[in-house]
């Protein structure tokens, strides 16, 4: 797959790193979808969000427990810079592209 400004790039240790542009696009996407038009944190009331640079992989725990690897949902998170409250969002549903190789 060709490089794109919209692709999160793999990093050592299986981590996906978002560019500054992607982090800004995430904040714009959340602001566009938010019913909270002020953008204020529900805990402290500040409007001081930052998008974390890494995509978080949230495992789906099988029931009953299994030895097979768990499926994961890639998520991005926004953190309130004032009180550390965290919001997490499904990355693929939000249109964030994840690329596994430089093909």
Image (tube, rainbow, N blue to C red):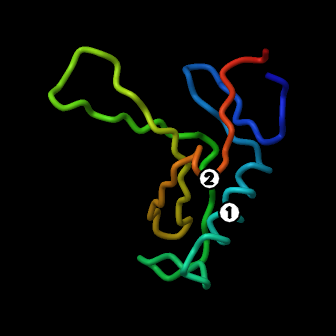
Q: How many numbered markers are drawn?
A: 2
Q: Residue at x 52, y 70 (%)?
A: 82
Name above or below for residue 38 compared with residue 30: below
Q: Nearer the viewer, residue 52 or 97?
A: 97
Dot 1 corresponds to which residue? Answer: 29
Q: Residue at x 67, y 56 (%)?
A: 26
Horizontal arrangement in the rendering, residue 27 relative to residue 89 (left or right): right
Q: Residue at x 56, y 48 (%)?
A: 76
Dot 2 corresponds to which residue? Answer: 94
Horizontal arrangement in the rendering, residue 76 relative to residue 21 (left or right): left
Name above or below for residue 47 compared with residue 102: below
Q: Position of residue 62 (x, y in %)?
A: 24, 30
Ranked by sequence position, the earlier of labels 1 and 2 is: 1
Q: Position of residue 10 (x, y in %)?
A: 66, 25
Q: Are marks 1 and 2 in contact (CB under 8 Å)?
A: yes
Local SS, label 1: helix
> What is the quadrant of residue 61 in the picture?
top left
Q: Position of residue 57 (x, y in %)?
A: 47, 36
Q: Nearer the viewer, residue 78 or 30?
A: 30
Name above or below for residue 28 compared with residue 77: below
Q: Position of residue 58 (x, y in %)?
A: 41, 39
């Amino acid at each position: 797959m060709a490089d794109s400004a919209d692709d999160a790039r793999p990093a050592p240790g299986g981590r996906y790193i978002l560019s500054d542009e992607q982090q800004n696009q995430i904040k714009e996407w959340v602001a566009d979808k938010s019913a909270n038009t002020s953008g204020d944190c529900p805990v402290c009331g500040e409007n001081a969000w930052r998008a974390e640079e890494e995509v978080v992989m949230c495992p789906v725990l099988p029931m009953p427990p299994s030895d097979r690897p768990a499926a994961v949902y890639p998520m991005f998170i926004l953190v309130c810079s004032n009180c550390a409250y965290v919001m997490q969002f499904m990355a693929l549903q939000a249109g964030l592209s994840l690329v596994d190789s430089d093909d």
